[in-house]
């Protein structure tokens, strides 16, 4: 329950703390996507950096002005925004595997990895995790000998132990090639396996004369029950110099959804959009706006492809509207709530790439984004800069 108590403390402190720190640490949007770290407001780091030492406040203001040319939920997409373009990837590099001899650590001459093929498994899917080792120097793959595998699950403060995934290097049950040194675990979630999963593998490296037992641990997320599904129905239009796309979902669990997508022109990335919307049950539509300046600055005409359509239902036990209540109401809720579930339930990823109409580039406006929140942020950052002189 530690996180619950923390929320309670923040709720009471939030009633008392007003002013600059609050303004600087808020976003124009309802929250930042885990998959959109490339697009975070640079001024949000200002308070944190100030606590650690000197900060160039002129640069902070300049960076914010440049960032705020576009709205928080519609950003230019570049080829190096891999966290957004490769939105399902989980990058796990190999790590050196030292051995212990005579009470001292020394290099074994091998590096290994325990790598999930993607970060989230949804309804109807299985997920593979690959264990492999490379010999230092020539990078040749070597075989491993598994001695133990454990799977632990965490859902909020609740812990449980799902069945350990099957594993082999026999070319069967999800393993691609027999004896190639890639030991493959296959996780097939049960409906109740809604949690962050932590897989630990203990193993020896064939050819390592020390016989030392190594251990690696990795993490992925299991969301095995779909709260909604994309139907594939998508419409688009240009309005006020921006591109709007409406996507349809068949919703099983009504609630607050976050929906994201990438926009491409052919194989060239153009933009990213996100919306936070409350959806009822049944067939529902949600609209994503690709800001006009995003498309105008990319200089790429349509038709465009809507790539990587993805969404999740917000299932955090602490919903945003709760903290807006009175301290007494918050305290009563927190005294009874159980933090026993993950913060999100993931919609199965849509594999299609619907195409828009063939819009002309001049249909999109190149004017900068403006909002009361943006103007207030600039005023506050300027005041902070001036007070520091």
Image (spheres, grey):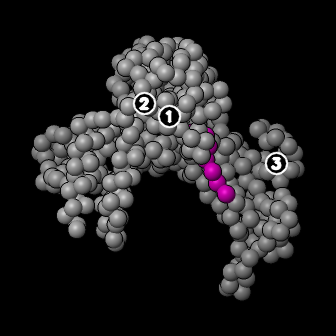
Magenta span main SS: loop
Work out whether residue 359 or residue 12 is closer to the camera in this orientation and state it: 359
Region rendered in magenta: 86-93
Q: Does residue 199 belong to the magenta stretch?
A: no
Residue 195 showing in the rendered view: no
Quarter of the image containing the C terminus? Answer: bottom left
Work out whether residue 102 or residue 236 is closer to the camera in this orientation and state it: 236
Residue 169, image x, y percentages: 82, 48
Q: Earlier in the sequence, mark 2 or mark 3?
A: 3
Of circles 2 and 3, which is in front?
2
**Distance (Cα) linking label 2 and label 1:** 7 Å
Residue 297 tag number: 1
Q: Earlier in the sequence, mark 1 or mark 3?
A: 3
Residue 364, image x, y percentages: 45, 23
What secondary structure is found at the residue carrying circle 1?
helix
Q: Which residue is mark 3?
A: 169
Q: Are marks 2 and 3 in contact (CB under 8 Å)?
A: no
Q: Does residue 92 belong to the magenta stretch?
A: yes
In the image: residue 106, left or right of residue 5: right
Q: Residue at x 40, y 45 (%)?
A: 67
Residue 366 tag number: 2
């Amino acid at each position: 329950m530690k996180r619950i108590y923390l929320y309670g403390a923040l709720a009471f402190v939030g009633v008392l703390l007003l002013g600059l720190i609050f303004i600087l640490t808020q976003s124009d949007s309802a929250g930042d996507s885990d998959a959109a770290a490339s697009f975070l407001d640079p001024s949000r780091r200002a308070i944190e950096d100030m606590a650690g030492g000197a900060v160039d406040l002129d640069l902070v203001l300049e960076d914010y002005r440049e960032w705020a040319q576009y709205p928080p939920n519609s950003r230019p997409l570049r080829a190096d925004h891999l966290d957004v373009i490769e939105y399902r990837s989980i990058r796990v590099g190999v790590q050196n595997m030292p051995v212990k001899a005579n009470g001292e650590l020394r290099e074994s001459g091998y590096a290994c990895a325990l790598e999930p093929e993607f970060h989230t498994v949804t309804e109807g899917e299985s997920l593979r995790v690959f264990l492999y080792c490379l010999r230092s120097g020539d990078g040749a793959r070597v075989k491993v000998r598994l001695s133990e595998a454990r799977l632990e699950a965490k859902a909020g403060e609740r812990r449980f132990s799902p069945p350990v995934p099957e594993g082999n290097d026999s070319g069967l049950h999800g393993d691609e090639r027999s004896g190639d040194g890639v030991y493959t675990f296959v996780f097939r979630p049960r409906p109740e396996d809604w949690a962050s999963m932590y897989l630990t593998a203990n193993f020896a490296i064939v050819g390592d004369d020390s016989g030392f037992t190594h251990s690696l641990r990795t993490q992925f997320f299991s969301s095995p029950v779909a709260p909604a599904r994309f139907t594939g129905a998508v419409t688009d239009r240009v309005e006020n110099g921006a591109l709007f796309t409406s996507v349809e979902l068949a919703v099983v669990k009504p609630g607050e959804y976050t929906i994201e997508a990438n926009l491409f022109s052919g194989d060239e990335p153009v933009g990213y959009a996100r919306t936070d919307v409350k959806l009822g049950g049944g067939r529902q539509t949600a609209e994503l706006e690709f800001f006009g300046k995003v498309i105008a600055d990319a200089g790429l005409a349509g038709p465009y492809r809507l790539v990587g359509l993805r969404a999740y239902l917000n299932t955090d036990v602490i919903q945003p509207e709760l903290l807006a209540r009175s301290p007494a109401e918050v305290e009563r809720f927190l005294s009874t709530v159980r933090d026993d579930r993950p913060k999100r339930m993931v919609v199965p990823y849509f594999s299609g790439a619907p195409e828009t109409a063939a819009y002309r580039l001049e249909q999109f406006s190149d004017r900068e984004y403006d909002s009361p929140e943006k103007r207030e942020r600039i005023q506050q950052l300027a005041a902070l800069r001036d007070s520091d002189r």
